[in-house]
Image: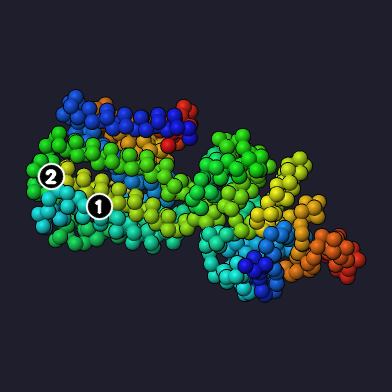
Amino acid sequence: MRGKTWGAVVALHLGLVAVLFALNFVLPVYHQGVLARVMVLAVYAIGYNIAFGYTGLLSLGHAMFFGAGLYGAGLMGLHFGMSALPAWLVGTGAGALLALVVGALALRTAGVSFMIVTLMFAQAVYLTILYFGDITHGDDGFVVPGVSRTLAGIDLSQQHPRYLVGWVLFSAALLFSLWLVRAPFGRVLVAIRENEERARLLGYDTGRRKLGALVISGAISAASGAAYGLLFGYVGASFAGVQYSIFALLWVLLGGAGTVLGPFVGTLFMFYLIDLATGVTDAYMLIAGVVLVGLTLFAPQGIVGEVRRRLWRDLP
Amino acid sequence: MSDVILSTKGLSKSFDGLRANHDINFALHRHEVHALIGPNGAGKTTFVSMLIGRLRPTSGVITFEGRDVTRLGAQARVQAGMAYTFQITSVFAKLSCHENVALAARRLGGDVEAEVASALSRVGLGARAGEIAGDLSYGHQRLLEIAMGLAQRPALLILDEPTQGLAESEIAGFKALIRGLATETTILLIEHNMSVVMELADRITVLNFGEVLAQGTPQEIHQSAEVQSAYLGTGGDDAEH
């Protein structure tokens, strides 16, 4: 890639970060709340994209990592009254550790088997949460206590701090993912996605690199889950259920798998699609469904993927 | 440093009782171009797959640079200095030529850009660095494979049927390329094109029915009655095979 195009790429990503910062001060309260949620969940999608979009690991169980972060942070607050930052770190670490263990086992399989195995592990995590109901409050979930929703004396349940913390986390994840896919490690992940046997015969230990990618992916997903619980105040088992695994896949596919901006665009698109459709009819899933079918037909590489194909070939 | 870079002792491979390779003793000398030939189904690809570590031998020992590598995985053997180009073109089809070669060069560190430019220009693809590998003609993809091999600066380069699908003009260029390489690396060439073999090889090993049939200089192989019989089906008892 020429230096000039790379400059434009960096400018585009930093531009998005700047615009999102500015929106905090101009958006009406409702949209500001939606965007805060979208940014935090887009971090989850960014994490998923590193495994699926860049390394080609189609996981159907990423909700377990999101849930590990959510519960890791929330339980620290509920049972130990931990404040926001250490609770967030515990949640993120829990996701990374879970990804390491699950990855070491699940990566012995590939393709469809990998999908099934990750799905099974995620179900096991989900059922574990329900089983230990006296600790996790099972199906009902729990409200994160106020002490854990405070960062350096700032109340994170207030709309502006909440938005800005979400923005910091999103910006960090976005720029990290931009850096990663250009770094030698990220290039090898793409090589594994494209042709693992060839990558191995170029002397790369593909097994370890896939595990590394999954741990990074799981940690970022957990960072999102932990922040989601702390910022929005509710922890519940449904966030660790299978539909949250599917959401990550859906957002990434819609936005463009294997693109840096795709996860954010996909998450934003899906949120506003449902938001607008709900305003039109009670049968909003019908409208959402038709739009999704249309996108799959006419932009199979996702929104950002289509932009890259038609307009900007060097977009990472 | 021993003169023998790679050797095998009693190397055998069976697939469910089918003997693909049997008791192969083989030695490859440093800086030689060694050709491996034999009729279709003679076990050439099985043999090199065991050398590079894609297949585990049923029995026997492989020694590379004085070290027993029989139990090592493919990536460890590549790290030890072997490089392999695939018989069926196996480039990263969606990535640029530049990135394909850069992936090969980057593992070694050093000046990746210079290494990529040099490898691509040696195979004559210097002007196509920015093109997507999958858009190249088949012959050019074969050359890209070789560039990926070169960029790894291997001590031993294994080329599995490199001229398959190349045009006559490209084959001439390929011969010149290999002659230039012979001074810096050792080359094991699996090849069907006899003019390429006869012109390039210092020594030739002939496999037939999974066993070594003959070994020698091109001259000796050319005159061997056994080889003639295996290839042409004449003169031997097994003419009807």
**Mark 1: which secondary structure?**
helix
Residue for badge 1? A92
Q: Position of residue A98 (x, y in %)?
A: 30, 58
Name the amino acid type tagged 2: Leu
Q: Which mark is residue A151?
A: 2
Q: Residue furthest front?
A: B1
- Crowding around mark 2 (Cα neighbors within 10 Å: few <14, some 14 to 19, many 20+) is some
Task: Place residue B159 in its image quadrant.
Answer: bottom right
Left or right, B94 with reference to A28: right
Name the amino acid type tagged 1: Thr
Q: CA distance from mark 1 to mark 2?
A: 17 Å
Q: Position of residue A143 (x, y in %)?
A: 12, 48
Q: Earlier in the sequence, mark 1 or mark 2?
A: 1
Task: Tell which subunit mark 1 falls on.
Answer: A
* Residue depicted at x 39% and y 62%: A105
Residue B9 or residue A131, whichever sits in front = B9
